[in-house]
Structures are given as structure tokens and as C-alpha cells.
Image: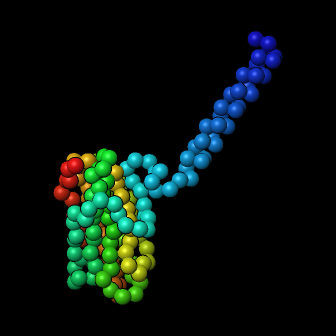
Amino acid sequence: MSKISTMKRNILSGAAICGVVVGVTLGGVSTASAAPAGYAGPFDGPCKGSLVRTIGLPDSVGQIQVWYDSSGSGTYCAKTYDNRSGQHRMEIRLRHWKWATSWNDTGLYDTYAGGIYVSEADTQCAYVSGWVEVNGTRYTRSETLVCETS
């Protein structure tokens, strides 16, 4: 192989590697809708689909709301709402029943934590938990959601 052929091959290899690096880098800067299948959030705004479950927290301090969107492969979306005035620490956690990793949103909020969603849940179940902390007391609930079908 000539020096020119070797040099062309090295230049093309370098360009290909740079293209992959740029593609991976740009692919990592995305919105929730472009996130890898499975998890996304937290995001502001309404959850898509229909409200399928409301789970009250102890002492009526708040509630967990879960929506299900049957379009595509099925998606659960969840938020923890606070019924008390002022800011409180709260969390929403959602996990597809097949996966070990949970997706969550925890912080100090006026109204709600989340929304968090898990996709590829068509005819599958999900696990949801949430809590609101008021005056140092954490009010929490968790449930395995009844599987929705499209």
C-alpha cells in the first residue's frame, strides 16, 4: 500500500471517529421526548393520556396521580401533589416493573413533583411511590399499578 493510500485511509478513519463522537455528543443534548425509550422527566406540564389512578397520601397532605397513554407502546406518567400551602419537600418515583432502576424527581416545590414517565408499558405494570414532607413528617404511599391494556 502506498503512502498516499495509507494517509487517505487514516484521514477517513479519523473523520469517521469524529463523526461518531459528534453524533454521540449531540445526541446526549436532547429534550425529554427524545430521551431513550423507558424513562424521562421530570418535566413541567400536563401528563398525556387519561388519569387512571389517584393515590391519597396519609392525613390528606397530598396525592399521587397517575396517567396512562395507550398510544404507541403505552406510557405511564406520575406526579406527587401537595395539598398544603407553601413549599414542601416532595418526591415522585416511577419504575417499569421489569426494570430495576426507578426514575424520580425530588425537591422543594409549591404544587407538585414530576412528571416522570416510563414507556414501553403496554400490557405491563409499573411501580409508583411518592411523598410530601410537612413540618419534618414524611407522608408516603407506594403501589404496584394495575396493568393497563391498549
Q: Is residue 125 left or right of residue 42?
A: left
Q: Is residue 13 left or right of residue 33?
A: right
Q: Is residue 52 left or right of residue 17?
A: left
Relative to 44, is 31 above or below?
Answer: above
Q: Which quadrant of the figure has residue 136? A: bottom left
Relative to 117, is 61 above or below?
Answer: below
Q: Is residue 97 visible?
A: no
Residue 149 x, y percent position in the rendering: 20, 50
Report the quarter where the N terminus lies: top right
Q: Is 119 in front, or is 139? A: 119
Q: Residue visible at 67% across and 37% down?
A: 18
Residue 138 x, y percent position in the rendering: 31, 79
Q: Residue visible at 77% across and 17% down?
A: 5
Query: In the rendered view, how is the structure colored?
Result: rainbow
Residue 107 x, y percent position in the rendering: 43, 74
Q: Residue visible at 64% across and 43% down?
A: 22
Q: Residue visible at 27% across and 82% down?
A: 61
Q: Which quadrant of the figure has residue 16? A: top right
